[in-house]
Amino acid sequence: MRKTRAVIKLIFLFLLFMSFYLKTFSQAETQVGDEKFSTFETQDFNTKNLEEELEKGEISQDPLKQALPPGEQGRRKALPPEEREKLLREIFNLPESLPETTRQKYSKENLLQAYPKKRKKPYEIIEKEIKLDLDPAEVPITLEQCLRCAIHKNYDIRINNAAKEQEKWAFRKSLTEFLPDVGYEYIQRRLDGEILVGGVVPIETSQTSIRTMFEVRWLVFDGFRRYFDAKIAKQLYDISKLRLKFTKDEILLFTTSQYYKLLQDKLNIIILLKNLEQTQEQLEITKDRFEAGVGTKFDVLRSETEVFNSKQNLIEAFQRLKESQVNLANTLGIAVETPLMPVENEPKEKRLVLGELDIKRFIDKAIENRPDLKIARINVKTARTERNRVISEYLPSFNFFAEKGWQGERGLDIPDSGRLRGFRIIGFEIRLIFERLGLRAYTNIRELNQNLKKFKFEAIKTQRDIIEFLLKSYYDTIAAKALIKATKKEVLSANESLRLSVVRLEAGVGIFTDVITAQLRATSSQIKHLSAIVDYNETQAQLLFDMGIIDIDTLLNGYKIGNKQSYP
């Protein structure tokens, strides 16, 4: 009994060993030319195997489907096994006399050579690592579409437009204060009981009194207070219109900046995708050199580190892209989760300020057109008007009134007492009141004088700040233009340096560290060049904003100053 158990255990161990050996052998790699491909499972080379490899991604195309005529490709799965084998032999020129194992191996190797294994793109790899609940369907957009959408749908613009309408009706309401009050009055009273005649003799009476009249009351003059109130309302209405204009200018600038930021993030991803592909290729080369005995394990680890670092940079770039999409969608006033995507696939510098670049002209344009400077100046006028209104309280008011009516009483023992008799009243009233002995208005005037002085200083500061930011934008534009040229040369130099470092490494005279350094510099130079172009475009838009001439037309076609063409 013990011997039988021992034999069974030996047989079981033998079968376990053979299954492990066959599994290891089936996963061995077969060298075909300069490429390495995983072997198929040790089964007959039939269509079932082929479809399994298609699902696994081992081969990129279906040779059986391509061998059939165009009109018959749909019946590939209905082919009998013999006809499929015949087609495969015809595709790879396999003789009938080859042994089964040799035919099987030879055909599979040729199949892999003709249709190599599909590799997942870095984009697909990174997308799996980013989990976002956004609509995968990207919405292509242009800068013009963004600008027009923002003008019509942005909520800051809508809020300021509603505020402008509110101030418009407040101004119209102040004008109605100059109109007279017109009214009508009707009074009817019934008296039943005793009354004293002459204050002595009581008599029983029952009478009805009626009074009806029209009246007009008009405050002709109130010391100019109504005039100043209407003037203040008009100035506030003008401020609301300028504030709406300034908000539109800001939204156009924000939209342009966010659009270019989104475009920069998109093109950065393209650069980083290419960098990831290059680092993956370098990793494959490094592994081959290590297996061939001409490389080191350290180089392999360094190469793997660069691949992982490239993936991290790409993940961060995708995250920045999503954030830029959210910011732009919110500014446009559309659904915040809309995945917007610029249609441009390459950076282009866009010059918007055309003609002679004269900083004095720029300053004059800004002082003439900036809405916020106009608002500051109107604030000074409004403060002066408020002070003058308080001064007008020392003047008298003149009020005119007129009444026309009818009255009468019924029930009295007087002939013809029930008939209504007409009457009219015309008069005027002059009043002069000094509240708190006039000291209240005096202290209020002194307070408003300081308020006026404050707004004057704010207007001066606003103008100085505008000039400061205008000069900064002017010099930023010149620097950004020069930076584009410098970074372009750096890109050309870095790409050539990368190419030479790879050639030296393959020739055995270079080191892998030089390749990594050159790769980093090439990627960094491309990102810097892209950033320089985006910064230049943004500074051009900022320059238009600082001069107060930004609108959809100037952002798309530029603004010409003077006749002489001069470029920074």
Image: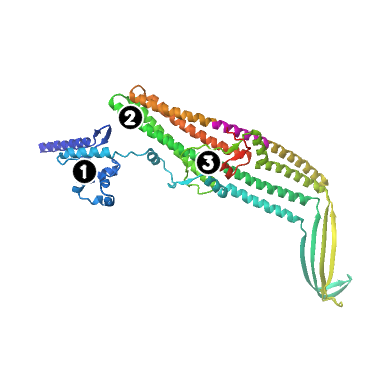
Looking at the rendered image, the disc whose residue lies closer to the viewer, 1 or 2, is 1
Q: What residue is at 71 percent from the left and 43 percent from the top?
A: 378
Against 326, residue 471 (above or below) is above
Disc 2 residue crowd, few under 14, some 14–19, many 20+, Cα 10 Å: some
**Along the horizontal axis of the image, is 112 left or right of 180?**
left
Considering depth in this image, is 414 or 18 the residue closer to the camera? 18
473 magenta-colored: yes
Q: Read off the residue under disc 3.
A: 258
Q: Horizontal placement of 39 versus 415: left or right? A: left
Which residues make up the magenta segment? 463-481
Q: Earlier in the sequence, mark 2 or mark 3?
A: 3
Q: Is residue 258 visible?
A: yes
Residue 565 position by quadrant:
top right
Q: Position of residue 485 (x, y in %)?
A: 51, 30
User: Magenta segment, principal secondary structure?
Assistant: helix
Any mark on residue 401, and which?
none
Quarter of the image where one finds residue 476: top right
Q: Nearer the viewer, mark 3 or mark 1?
A: 1
Q: Residues within 10 Å of mark 3 (few under 14, many from 20)?
A: many
The numbered mark, 1 or 2, whose residue comes first in the sequence reads: 1
Residue type, mark 1 in image: Glu
Query: Circle 1 is placed at which residue position?
Result: 90
Q: Secondary structure at mark 2?
A: helix
Identify the residue at horizontal 77%, vertical 52% (top origin).
Answer: 226
Residue to which mark 2 is pinned = 285
Label 1 Cα neighbours within 10 Å, binned few <14 / some 14-19 / many ≥20: few
Secondary structure under badge 3?
helix
The answer to whether 217 is drawn above or below residue 521 in the figure is below
Residues at marks 2 and 3, CA–CA distance in whole angstroms: 40 Å
Q: Are marks 2 and 3 in contact (CB under 8 Å)?
A: no
- Rendered residue at 76%/64% (across/down): 183
